Image (cartoon, helix red, strand yellow):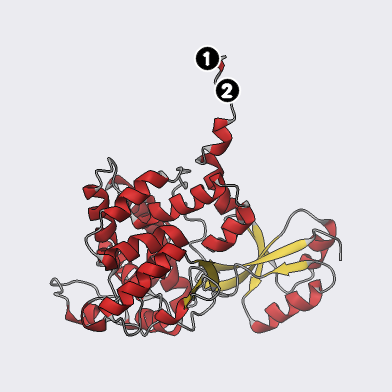
Amino acid sequence: MKEGRSITLKHLLIKDKKQIGLQFFSDKIIEAMVRELPDVKWSKEFSMAYVVNTKANLDLVFEKFKGVAWVNTHYFFDNKPINEEAEPMDITWFRNRAIPRNYRLCPTPYLDKLEIKKYANNTVKSYVMAFEYFINYYPDKALNSINENDVRDYILNLVQKGKSDSYINMAINSIKFYYESVLGMPNRFYKIDRPRKAKKLPQVLSKEAVLKIIANTNNLKHKCIVSLLYSSGMRRSELLNLKISDIDSTRMLIRVNAAKGKKDRFTLLSHNVLEDLREYYKQWHPKTYLIEGLYGQQYSAQSIGQVVANAAKKAKIPIKVSPHMLRHSFATHLLEDGVDLRQIQVLLGHSSTKTTEIYTHVATKAFKTIKNPLDD
């Protein structure tokens, strides 16, 4: 097999029939082999060759290019991992809400597929609500008749309404989920333009500001919440799912289970926080989750955010402080103290060092060694 030679399979829908799209860089050998496929055609719209989507044709593609080119199926097969540790899906909100007259509800198969895939409850609610807004934008159109132009018009409407980039991306994902995962239809929306991701630097607090926030919490539980977020670099959702058994005081580590990307990892446990946690345990007696709400229920994400915001306000921090800002501060302060970027990546649970490298732009240690030309 020639190094770098590959062919990518993509779903196409041409004249309401499913096709296997064959995308490849100009290569005489691949071009000749593609021409040998049965009833192969060329699509000007998608700029690729295609054959009818049948199991026989799919098997033939794999057989023909075996040992000649790498067959990339990333866009063709749904390889999204299933979160085996996900909590049971709760859609009581879906059944109990007040429904406006003539409102189009999310199809039942959509909910079923989300449950089979074991999506998190927050994601389920976001997807369902976003998809319902979309289908009610076209109240008189059959779902199967909606095309790329319809989706583009809807996305443009969201942009004009001032919706955030993250919301627009989530709306696109909710639409694609229905057509690709629920209906098993071709990936006909993969040409939909997404908002360009803004390259914003993370907001970081000084160590002194973090200590002020911790000192201004209302009680020991709140102190533990803020201290854990900062000293471990955990995400808010990870703290909410943290169990008593995840605290390893022998090795001074915290086990973070099924974090973002469905990956387990370990992060740091502070000696100071451990002392507070032991006292907190004696006072509050949590049963399952380390941070519990009323009647032993899991603490809410909104409550975590409120605890941080209230403490920051009391500490007279001049900016709005979020739980994620404490995570950013944890990473930046480690980098400023000389901790290796790769180690910080592991502690944060980032898949790539490129994500972690953003903190090199806000760490001040490197800047302190540079002499300002005006001061020379």
Residue 11 location (% of width, % of height):
58, 69
Pick whichever, 327 or 57, lies toward us: 327
Vertical relation: 188 (above or below) 89: above
Q: Locate the C terminus by quadrant.
A: top right
Q: Which residue is mark 2?
A: 371
- Circle 1 crowding by C-alpha within 10 Å: few under 14, some 14–19, many from 20: few
Residue 22 location (% of width, % of height):
68, 65
Query: Left or right: 260 with respect to 303?
Result: right
Vertical relation: 200 (above or below) 150: above
Q: Which residue is mark 1?
A: 374
Query: Left or right: 38 with respect to 273?
Result: right
Residue drawn at (13%, 72%), measured in percent from left and top? 101
Residue 228 location (% of width, % of height):
40, 63
Pick whichever, 309 or 26, lies toward us: 309
Quarter of image, res 283: bottom left
Quarter of image, res 36: bottom right
Pick whichever, 280 or 231, lies toward us: 280
Q: Locate the N terminus by quadrant.
A: bottom right
Residue drawn at (32%, 55%), measured in percent from left and top? 214
Q: Secondary structure at mark 1?
A: helix
Residue drawn at (66%, 59%), measured in percent from left and top? 48
Q: Amino acid at mark 2?
A: Lys
Spatial CA distance of label 2 from label 1 is 9 Å
